């Protein structure tokens, strides 16, 4: 990709809008119900030519966005008009579900032509989504080194550095002058994208340092590499957790970093573009899973696909709602005698859920940033319980007064206040306790934390409120 | 910051753990209730020296993390031991609430010493958190250009490029040979961090192109800058939305990009580190606001501060819960007659809320990525309503059967199924409609979307279920 291809973001939305308009015009002309005009053929040709021109000047990343924003029919119309040498890059950029719809439209020959030119780690990224019958031919078409790299990348999990590293590094020896380095670099047509430093290795390919490109520029060509290189660098291992590495990139403002094996032998490179994608995806996955979606959804996917993407969370929610419903069922006699309880109970459960979610969000976040550990549980409990006690007395008190005025019963108001306070205390206790316990058990504290706390505060809230009411009001 | 200071992320947590342990040992020795030993003074000195050594070798970003993970007393103990020339960088890295606690511990002279060495855009970042009485002295201590830059940065909103750009760019003229450029660069001690390209300007400081550093290295020194530079680049304006620019960095794998005014005159630079911070913060803000927190919370903040951070969402939640409670109140007579309604109604409301949140999460996300616009509302409604109809019949049918078996009434089961289906349809209708309407009204569709949809599905669910029951069962 050359720098000349890309253009200001501010003009991008206009250009996408033009393409959408052209697609609509094309649709209108192709509509079978439409009155036929003499100039239809010519007009259609003009539209097609204009459309082709507009598509050709789009960057692959922008084409990926365009494809995601189109319903299936238009999406495939655009996909067929994209130059085949860009197919691979576009497939890398689109979301999983859209990729599936594009690959379904390609025959094996087209798929091979699209994927072969890609780098090893990029091929590894796509392999899961390719039809199995093309894989033997694809692997056979790669040279031995490339095949080995694809297999290496496939051997790591998606959240390990090994699956994200590339091999686009420039290595030099430490016992030469900068002048020699400069001459060596001049033999390249272009350096790999995002090259900000050269990796210095010895005869055994062991990494001994790094040489930022600009040090090469500000130092005299007579100096030796080992005199000016930085010996101690951020090195990572292929088994490292990719999110930790992304954090290191963010902390230390890195652009690239070397990946080494256990003997400090250089085996690959991690670049900031992969880390940005990771950070963005992390935020998105969190947002999606909080919303109860299993994965990014193609907004134009079939109803059936959407149902499958969403059913798991609905099922969990149904189970927790059913449990809460059975808790209420225990107190049906009390509700029969004092029907106000039915109207007031959702308030107790709702506020507990909201407050518990606040606590658990904060704790999970602090744990992810390693600001707190299991050892601080007592201190956190003390604080969160204090916050809840305060909120319970203030908000619970306010709602208690409202209940008293609405139903004319002081004791009902008092029960309401007590129940809200107790449910808020339960929410605080579990909001700290759940993530701590999950960490102790070696699980990700973020996973399903919101569902769990809501389940506890719903059933707990109903139990506390209806239980207190049964004890004191009936 | 030199490359030599930073170290592998994998060893970082060990080093932070060591510091935590030293702080605990220091605590123990200083404990007034403790039996006094002869060697206490010497032991304390050893601990202090070890602690100081460990702190001195930490990168400012890691020190920021450490400070965030400590209770106030330890935090200030560490803060006082940090070399004052790093204070400014650390203040930039810590969260707002922790920054407040650190600045409260510094006198005006220390604050000035910490802030003065920073770059203009960094000073602008901190200004809001500094005590007003130091501001006149701070501004007076800057030179004219620096002061102008601080004021310019302050004139832009936090989400505009102008507040994030720096001025660390290297500019060259287009009518010179690369050899001259190489000689010019050699006069620098070091190029600005993350410099991946030089900006080419004419005599009027108008940007005419960019020269990636590595093109400088692979091309012959005899060539002219204008022969090899890239003429068309990603340029941004200070008024541009920073999130759009971050998206462009992600799309086009940029490391730096020029910021220009309306006449293409170069005024600053945007670097990838600022964009990574922005992408990370965007994800975090979303997570926090979904959890009902106004801002990032200092986990060791006082109870009172936590209460203030959380009260707004609790108050909103209380209002919506109260409305739902009044809806139930309308049907108290029905519940009195058939108390099973009280136990079943939270299921109807809960499933509707979950499903509505799925829809609204997906639509808000697709709108943020500009995959869908207001024009596609009919198509989206059709699909979401179909998904809901399917889910309503399947899950509603299942729960209807359970209700029938539990309470021995077929008609109760049928009402349950019908109510769940209708509430899911309502959730789908509003899940698409709310973000579309908010966009039409020029508002951010993400803001409060979850609260709104839950309010609708709660009150709506209670109304639909109890209404149907009143009509058909009593």
Image: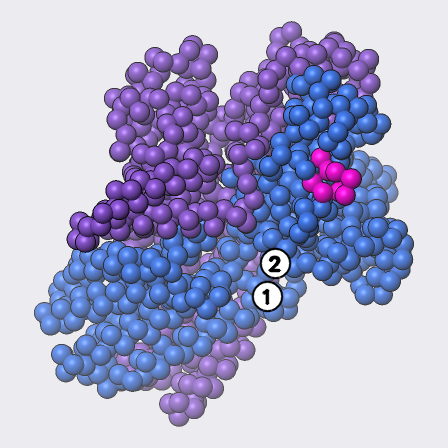
Chain colours: A blue, B purple
Q: Is residue B422 magenta?
A: no
Residue hosting label 2:
A297
Task: Name the magenta segment's main secondary structure.
Answer: loop
Q: Kindly identify which numbered label has been placed on residue A248.
A: none
Q: Position of residue B24 (x, y in %)?
A: 32, 50
Q: Can residue B315 be seen?
A: yes
Dot 1 lies on which element? Answer: helix
Q: Which residues are magenta?
A: A200-207
Q: Kindly identify which numbered label has been placed on residue A309.
A: 1
Q: Residues within 10 Å of mark 1 (few under 14, many from 20)?
A: some
Which chain does the numbered disc 2 sit on? A
The residue sitting at 30% across, 65% down in the picture is A429
Most foreground residue, A383 or A78: A383
> In this picture, is B444 found above or below A429?
above
The residue sitting at 70% across, 16% down in the picture is A220
State if disc 1 and disc 2 touch (CB < 8 Å): yes
The residue sitting at 69% across, 43% down in the picture is A269
- Position of B362 with respect to A140 (left or right) is left
- Position of B43 with respect to A117 (left or right) is left
The residue sitting at 57% across, 32% down in the picture is B3
Q: Position of residue A63 (x, y in %)?
A: 72, 43
Q: Position of residue B127 (x, y in %)?
A: 35, 26
* Mark closest to the chain's N terminus, 2 or 1: 2
Q: Quadrant of residue B347?
A: bottom left
Most foreground residue, A92 or A205: A205
């Amino acid at each position: 990709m050359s720098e000349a291809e890309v253009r200001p973001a501010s003009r991008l939305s206009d250009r996408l809008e033009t393409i959408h308009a052209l697609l609509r015009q094309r649709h209108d002309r192709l509509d079978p119900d439409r009155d036929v005009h003499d100039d239809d053929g010519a007009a259609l040709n003009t539209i097609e030519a204009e459309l082709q021109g507009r598509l050709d000047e789009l960057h692959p990343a922008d084409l990926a966005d365009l494809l995601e924003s189109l319903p299936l029919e238009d999406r495939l119309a655009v996909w067929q008009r994209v130059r085949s040498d860009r197919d691979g890059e576009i497939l890398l950029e689109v979301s999983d579900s859209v990729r599936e719809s594009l690959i379904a439209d390609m025959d094996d020959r087209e798929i091979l032509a699209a994927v072969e030119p890609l780098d090893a780690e990029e091929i590894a990224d796509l392999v899961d989504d390719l039809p199995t019958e093309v894989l033997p031919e694809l692997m056979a078409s790669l040279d031995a080194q490339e095949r080995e790299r694809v297999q290496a990348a496939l051997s790591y999990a998606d959240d390990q550095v090994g699956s994200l590293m590339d091999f686009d590094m420039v290595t030099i020896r430490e016992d030469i002058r900068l002048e020699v380095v400069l001459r060596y670099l001049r033999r390249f047509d272009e350096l790999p994208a995002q090259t900000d430093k050269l990796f210095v290795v010895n005869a055994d390919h062991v990494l001994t340092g790094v040489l930022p490109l600009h040090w090469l520029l500000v130092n005299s060509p007579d100096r030796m590499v080992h005199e000016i290189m930085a010996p101690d660098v951020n090195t990572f291992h292929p088994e490292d957790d990719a999110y930790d590495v992304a954090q290191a990139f963010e902390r230390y403002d890195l652009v690239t970093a070397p990946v080494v094996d256990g003997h400090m032998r250089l085996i690959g490179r991690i670049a900031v573009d992969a880390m940005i994608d990771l950070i963005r995806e992390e935020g998105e996955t969190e947002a999606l899973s909080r919303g109860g979606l299993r994965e990014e959804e193609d907004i134009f996917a079939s109803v059936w696909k959407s149902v499958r993407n969403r059913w798991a969370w609905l099922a969990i929610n149904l189970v927790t709602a059913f449990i809460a419903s059975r808790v209420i069922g225990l107190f049906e006699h009390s509700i029969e005698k004092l029907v106000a309880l039915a109207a007031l109970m959702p308030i107790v459960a709702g506020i507990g859920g909201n407050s518990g979610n606040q606590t658990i969000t904060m704790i999970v976040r602090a744990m992810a940033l390693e600001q707190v550990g299991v050892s601080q549980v007592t201190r956190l409990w003390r604080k969160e319980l204090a916050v809840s006690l305060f909120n319970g007395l203030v908000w619970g008190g306010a709602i208690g007064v409202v209940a008293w005025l609405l139903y004319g019963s002081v004791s009902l108001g008092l029960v309401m206040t007590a129940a809200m306070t107790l449910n808020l205390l339960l929410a605080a206790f579990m909001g700290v306790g759940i993530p701590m316990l999950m960490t102790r058990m070696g699980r990700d504290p973020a996973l399903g934390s919101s569902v769990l706390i809501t389940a506890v505060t719903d059933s707990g809230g109903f139990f506390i409120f209806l239980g207190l009411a049964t004890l004191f009001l009936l």
